[in-house]
């Protein structure tokens, strides 16, 4: 077994690097460990990954976080494409001190095997965007920013309900407001299954019907728009798929404990003391902004 030393590309003011690797059918990468940390995921194809003596099958979406001590090798009968991000190991103690307590699982722990997860399409797209940004910035700031965002994704993945990939992809597509506003029929279409089957799976994964889940997602998008934009409330309601403004206001109040206007005032407290309800999970209504002092 060989040990790969810290390359010149991770020295000086360079803390992280990203490489896209293409393995051809029949290629084999011999057993090794590293003097640095490594994060990789499969873009296309299938890899046979043997790590610390355990043989694994990796498919698109599989994310692996390698520690320097992990020993691994690759093979593939059909070929695969992998995005590999290497970083200096001295970044990790500082991250552990600041953030390990916020996570149920610390991915650089002393477990026998490296931490792995299968991310939804939206998660992989987010990693791809981060990788593209790293291609032009190898600074310590960029390296820590990438790893912190990765930790945020891992925490979200730990609380995500188990559901089939086709439902994961359909829900990710609802980030496009055109799909979100189109109604339950659009969710069924995106799933590519019957309405009855979609409802059964949504009920099992989320504890509600597809219509209730869709309305929940619509209200969450409306809340983000109220916080972060100055678009009119009626326009926000219509853009999220609510044909009736009155129905939107009732549903929003039931979900967030405030009218849309009060919610906006509580979260866009610019140039004045931020009211307590702007920091609460369920804001209470405000009649008017607090006067400046």
Image: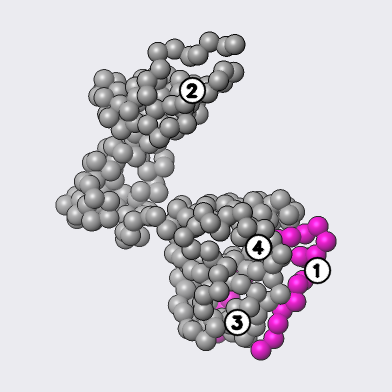
Q: CA distance from mark 4 to mark 2?
A: 38 Å
**Cα distance between the residues tagged 4 and 1:** 20 Å
Q: Residues within 10 Å of mark 4 (few under 14, many from 20)?
A: some
The residue most toward the right is: 12
Q: Quadrant of the C terminus?
A: top right
The residue labelled by disc 3 is: 71
- Compared across the picture, whether 6 is left or right of 131 comes to right
User: Residue 234 is drawn in which quadrant?
Assistant: top left
Query: What x and y, as percent, mark residue 196?
Result: 16, 52
Task: Mark 3 vs mark 4: give the one in front.
Answer: 4
Q: Which residues are magenta?
A: 1-26
Q: What distance separates the C-alpha of mark 3 from that of mark 1?
A: 21 Å
- Sequence-wise, the earlier of marks 4 and 1 is 1
Q: Which residue is mark 4?
A: 92
Distance from disc 3 to disc 2, alpha carbons, whole Å, reads: 53 Å
- State the residue at coordinates (39%, 27%): 283
Counting from the top left corner in percent of width and height, residue 174 is at: 37, 43
The residue at which mark 1 appears reads as: 8
Q: Which residue is more in the foreground, 3 or 266?
A: 266
């Amino acid at each position: 077994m060989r040990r790969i030393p810290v390359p010149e590309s991770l020295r000086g003011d360079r803390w992280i690097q990203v490489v896209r690797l293409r393995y051809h059918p029949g290629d084999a990468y011999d057993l090794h460990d590293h003097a640095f940390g490594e994060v990789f995921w499969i873009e296309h194809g299938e890899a046979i990954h043997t790590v610390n003596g355990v043989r694994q099958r990796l498919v698109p979406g599989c994310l692996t976080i390698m520690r320097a001590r992990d020993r691994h090798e690759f093979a593939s009968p059909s070929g695969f494409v992998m995005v590999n991000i290497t970083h200096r190991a001295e970044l990790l103690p500082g991250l552990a001190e600041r953030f390990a307590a916020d996570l149920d699982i610390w991915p650089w722990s002393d477990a026998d095997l490296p931490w792995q997860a299968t991310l939804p399409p939206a998660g992989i797209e987010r990693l791809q965007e981060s990788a593209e940004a790293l291609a032009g910035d190898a600074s310590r700031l960029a390296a820590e920013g990438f790893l912190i965002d990765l930790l945020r994704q891992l925490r979200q993945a730990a609380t995500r309900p188990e559901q089939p990939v086709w439902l994961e992809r359909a829900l990710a597509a609802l980030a496009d407001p055109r799909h979100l506003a189109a109604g339950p029929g659009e969710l069924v279409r995106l799933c590519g299954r019957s309405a009855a089957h979609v409802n059964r799976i949504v009920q099992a994964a989320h504890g509600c019907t597809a219509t209730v889940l869709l309305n929940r997602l619509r209200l969450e998008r409306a809340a983000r728009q109220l916080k972060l934009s100055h678009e009119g409330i009626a326009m926000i309601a219509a853009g999220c798929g609510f044909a009736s403004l009155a129905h939107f206001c009732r549903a929003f109040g039931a979900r967030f404990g405030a009218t849309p206007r009060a919610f906006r005032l509580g979260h866009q407290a610019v140039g004045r003391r931020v009211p307590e309800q702007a920091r609460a999970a369920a804001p209470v209504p405000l009649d008017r902004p607090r006067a400046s002092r």
